Image (spheres, helix red, strand yellow):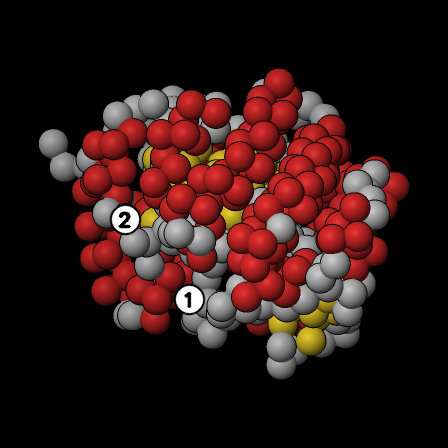
Amino acid sequence: MSMILKNDRFLRACRRESTDRTPVWMMRQAGRYLPEYRAVRQNADFMTMCQSPELAAEVTIQPIDRLGVDAAILFSDILVIPDAMGLELELIESRGPVFHKPLREVSAIRQLPVPDPDSDLGYVMEAIRLIQKRLDGRVPLIGFSGAPWTLMTYMVEGQSSKTFRFSKSLLLDEPAAAIDLLDRLSESVASYLLAQIRAGVQAVQIFDTWAGALPPHLYLEFGWPALESVIRALKPAGVPVIVFAKGADFVLERAIAAGATVFGADHSVPIGELASRTAGRIAVQGNLDPSVLYGSPDAIRREVNRLLTEWGGRPGHIFNLGHGIHPDVNPDHAKAMVEAVQAFRMKE
């Protein structure tokens, strides 16, 4: 899908081109902190919202209207791929995502299908086409997926985990089975994201939320190769690829070598340090601590100005949080952050 964008700051920054100001968007910007989102959520459960293109389009566009951010991100969930593989996802308010058929047997891994994104996840592609029609070129649309290792943790644990007991045991005790699962997920994620690109997204982000749950040597042995294969599969599509490996900034050089366009940074790494380490070889996205948005608008502006000053006006920066916005943040504070980014200019 080709269209003339009225605002291409985000895409220009991804390509490390000059922009009139730093583009800004937020992870989880279509979410529970917005009253208009909660109004939709009152009448539909989370998975119904994900699987209804009309509702997904509505909540995707809400933060564009309210906050004036420079990019939209598709409203969906990273766990739609395992759901399409037959693991039966349920989102339970008190527990979060739950798979009723967690992968605990090697034989179950061998039987796991690779979903066809256009049929098994066709509702996502339909949502993308509808969102693009309604956005009408106002801002680019970002598609996304979970990374193989992060998806694996939910599929094997059956839910969120603090210890990752079953996932880590699989890596340590059945490494061949773990690699088989990660390979299947790499193929599924790459296929899914390529389908999103065909449907019309102009950039994609890969979330490896639990990269930091593994010690670096295990992540480099298992998690990173699976993610790297996705990055390389996406490269011919020609759209920006954002890699967000939370707690794993040690893969920065590998992300550059694999051909990632943007390195998404959590808030554990100073942005100035990333500016020095990247030296203009890759764009950087991030990385304000989401908890700053609990502060007053004046405090938020100070933190935004500090971070942007530390970046130093170099091209190739996309302002974002170091993780998703918290659901109890005042939306006026999110607006204050966006306006502070929009108003910032480097002092001569």
Front of the two marks 2 and 1: 2
Mark before the other along the chain sequence, 2 or 1: 2
Residue bearing mark 2: 269
Residue at position x 55%, y 66% in the image: 165
Residue at position x 62%, y 81% in the image: 94
Residue type at the position of mark 2:
Val
Which residue lies most toward the front here?
A: 173
Residue at position x 40%, y 44% in the image: 217
Q: Nearer the viewer, residue 46 or 336?
A: 46
Q: Quadrant of the C terminus?
A: top left
Q: Secondary structure at mark 2?
A: loop
Q: Nearer the viewer, residue 58 or 243?
A: 243
- Answer few, some or many: residues within 10 Å of disc 1's Cα (few below 14, many 20 plus, some between 14 and 19): some
Residue type at the position of mark 1:
Asp
Q: Nearer the viewer, residue 247 or 24?
A: 247
Q: Cα distance, mark 2 to mark 1?
A: 27 Å
On residue 192, the disc is none
Residue at position x 68%, y 23% in the image: 2
Query: Is residue 110 rendered to the left or right of residue 92?
Result: right
Query: Is residue 41 rendered to the left or right of residue 27?
Result: right
Q: Quadrant of the N terminus?
A: top right
- Answer few, some or many: residues within 10 Å of disc 2's Cα (few below 14, many 20 plus, some between 14 and 19): some
- Vertical side of 120 occupied by 261: above or below: above
Residue bearing mark 1: 332
The picture places residue 266, in percent across and down from the top left corner, at 37, 51
Which residue lies most toward the bottom here?
A: 94
The picture quadrant where one finds residue 310 is: top left
The picture places residue 34, in percent across and down from the top left corner, at 55, 67
